Each structure stands twice: as C-alpha cells, then as structure tokens.
Amino acid sequence: RAKANRQGMYCFYEPKMDQSEEMRLAMELDLRQALAKDQLEVFYQPIAEISSGKTIGYEALVRWLHPVRGYISPAIFIPMAEEIGLITAIGEWVLRRACSDAANWSDTVSISVNVSTVQLKYGHIARTVEGALESSGLAPSRLILELTESALVGDNADTLKILTELKRFGVCLALDDFGTGYSSLSYLRNFPFDKVKIDKSFIDEINDNPDCLAIVEAIVRLCGILKMGTTAEGVETQAQLDLLASIGCELVQGYLIGRPMPLNAPSGPDRPHVSAA
Ligand code: C2E
Ligand code: MG
Ligand code: MG
Ligand code: MG
C-alpha cells in the first residue's frame, strides 16, 4: 500500500514492510472471526492483600488462542481490536464472562476487568456493565473496572459523566498502570477512582533505584490520604514484596503471587481452597 508522506508525495513500503503489512491484515481478518469461532479465553490472575496474604480478587485478562499462531498477547490484539472497531464486542464478551464466572466464587472475592478507552468513549459502557451485572447476578460491589489514564484525556466533562454513572451502579473504579502515560495528579482529584494500580515499571526498580522507591512511597501515601487503596503490579520477588509491605502498600499482583491462569487450572479461581480465601 502506498502512503502519503509529509510533503504529500507518495512513497512505497519496502518489500519487508509489505510482508508485515500483509501479516497484520491477515491477523485482523482472523481477529474478526475470533469471537464467533470461540477462540477467546479469559485467564484470571490473583490479587493478594499484603497484611493477610489472602487472595482478595482476580484480574480478568483476555487471551486469543489462534489456531495456527497459538496464544497471542492482548498487548498485540487489543490495540488492533481498538483500531478496527472490535473492542466493544470483545470487551463486552470479557466483561460478561468474567462477571458470570466470578458470581460462582466466594462473595468476598472481587473481579477486576479492563475497560478500553475506546469502549468508554464510544461503547455505551454503562449499559454494557448494567447488562453484565444483571445477567450474572454478581453484586456490583464485587466488580472493579480498570481504566488507564488515556481514558481521562480529552473531553473531561463527558468522561466524568460516564464514570459517575458507573459509580452509581455500585461498582469500583481503578486507575490502571498509574505513573505511565500522561500521569496527572488532577485525575485523582477530579475523577471518582477507588483504587490506584502502580505500574510494573516502577515496581521493577524499587529495590535498586531509590528514586523509584521514593515515587512509589509517595503514591502510596498520597492515595492513603485520598482514601484510595493501592495495588502494586508485576511483583516478582520477595524483596519487592517486603519493601512494598514496609511502605504500607495494600495489595499486590504479580508472578510471585500467581500467574494468570484459566478458570479450571489446578490452582485457578474455581478451586475451593483459593476462592474461599
Ligand atoms: P494490565 O491491565 O496492566 O495487566 C497486567 C499485565 O501484566 C498482564 O499482561 C499480566 O499478565 C502481566 N503481569 C502480571 N504480573 C506480572 C509479573 O509479575 N511479571 C510480568 N512480566 N508480567 C506480569 P497481559 O495479560 O499480557 O495483558 C496486557 C495488557 O492487555 C493488560 O495490561 C491490559 O491493558 C490489556 N488487556 C488484557 N485483557 C484485556 C481486556 O479484556 N480488555 C482490555 N481493554 N484490555 C485488556
Ligand atoms: Mg489491568
Ligand atoms: Mg495494569
Ligand atoms: Mg500494566
């Protein structure tokens, strides 16, 4: 495909780029069929309370099992789904599946579901959430919707209206990947978030980089003052967990606690000893 460059002249992709462009188009075609062909799955990753060590919830993470390529990361196909207008359908499917799965767990266990910025802006998210809660029978207080900061740039009045509507259902709102992107402290003040998830990139370095530790500590304290809980993402080592405990971080999620796993895995959410925690 030819593309206009800045000067308005046409330049052509190198053969190598043609190939990857072709691959992308093929993948998009496959993605359009993925839902109908039942190739999407929801994995669940535990979130634990540091003080008690108990699993208090799970994050739903979508997986695409491609018939030829195997598992494809959501980091690849979610942006693609956003681009080609599939995210609303995929997001609704994940939400419904996660809510109906979680409705069978212990009623002290919460379920976190990622909501794309595109869904929030164009996807009738309030109606979707209402429908998923109704059909699953899940108590709204057990549902946490995770949004990234990118959802908050742009028309703030519109976004605030939608978030307020969601809060009225009784669901919780979490600010995901905090510290990356456009991080603005005014988001914490202007939008009704209940929780903040501190991005993995900060957690990665807390034991080696005093600046990183200072930032994480400041976020935890600020959120404490604003009555918001903090979750540390991507915790992989005991040393990270110990440090997070010492600065008063409330919740942790990461490979140290558990990897994302299918519902019926030996230690998955549907095993009584875990869901009863
Ligand atoms: P996220 O919401 O920040 O989810 C956390 C990601 O970090 C997940 O990647 C998880 O598997 C990974 N992770 C958790 N603990 C660790 C750890 O200790 N070490 C390492 N290296 N990684 C860890 P995943 O499942 O590949 O998902 C990537 C992103 O894709 C998610 O980031 C989220 O933004 C998006 N995503 C996933 N499922 C959905 C969905 O249903 N809807 C939407 N809109 N986005 C989704
Ligand atoms: Mg998330
Ligand atoms: Mg996250
Ligand atoms: Mg993240």
Image (cartoon, rainbow, N blue to C red):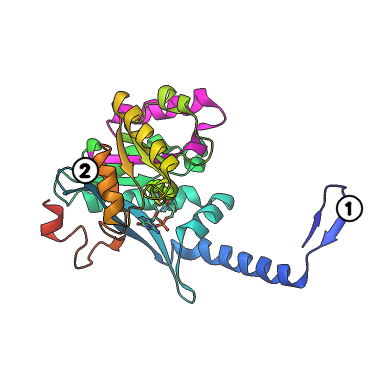
Whole-Å distance between the Cαs marked 1 and 2?
57 Å
Magenta stretch in the rendered image: 142-171
Magenta stretch encompasses residue 126? no
Disc nearer the start of the sequence (1/2): 1
**Prevailing SS of the magenta stretch:** helix
Residue drawn at x 23%, y 40% is: 142
User: Would you say 93 lies left or right of 45 here?
Assistant: right
Report helix, strand or loop for mark 1. Answer: loop
Judge by depth and name the residue closer to the eye, 76 or 244.
244
Q: Mark 1 sits on what residue?
A: 9
Judge by depth and name the residue closer to the eye, 9 or 178.
178
Image coordinates of residue 147 in percent, x first then y, are: 42, 39
Q: Give above or below for 261 relative to 53.
A: below
User: Would you say 4 lies left or right of 33 here?
Assistant: right
Q: Quadrant of residue 229?
A: top left
Image coordinates of residue 267 in percent, x first then y, are: 19, 64
Residue 51: tell me if it is visible.
yes
Image coordinates of residue 49 in percent, x first then y, are: 20, 44
Residue drawn at x 49%, y 74% is: 69
Report helix, strand or loop for mark 2. Answer: loop
- Bin the neighbour count of mark 1 within 10 Å (Cα to Cα): few under 14, some 14-19, many 20 and up: few
Q: Give above or below for 71 relative to 79.
A: below
Going by the numbered disc 1, the residue's amino acid type is: Met
Q: Is mark 1 within 8 Å of ligand 1?
A: no
Q: Give above or below for 259 relative to 103.
A: below
Q: Mark 2 sits on what residue?
A: 137
Going by the numbered disc 2, the residue's amino acid type is: Gly
Magenta stretch encompasses residue 161? yes
Image coordinates of residue 251 in percent, x first then y, are: 26, 43
User: Would you say 186 lies left or right of 112 here?
Assistant: right
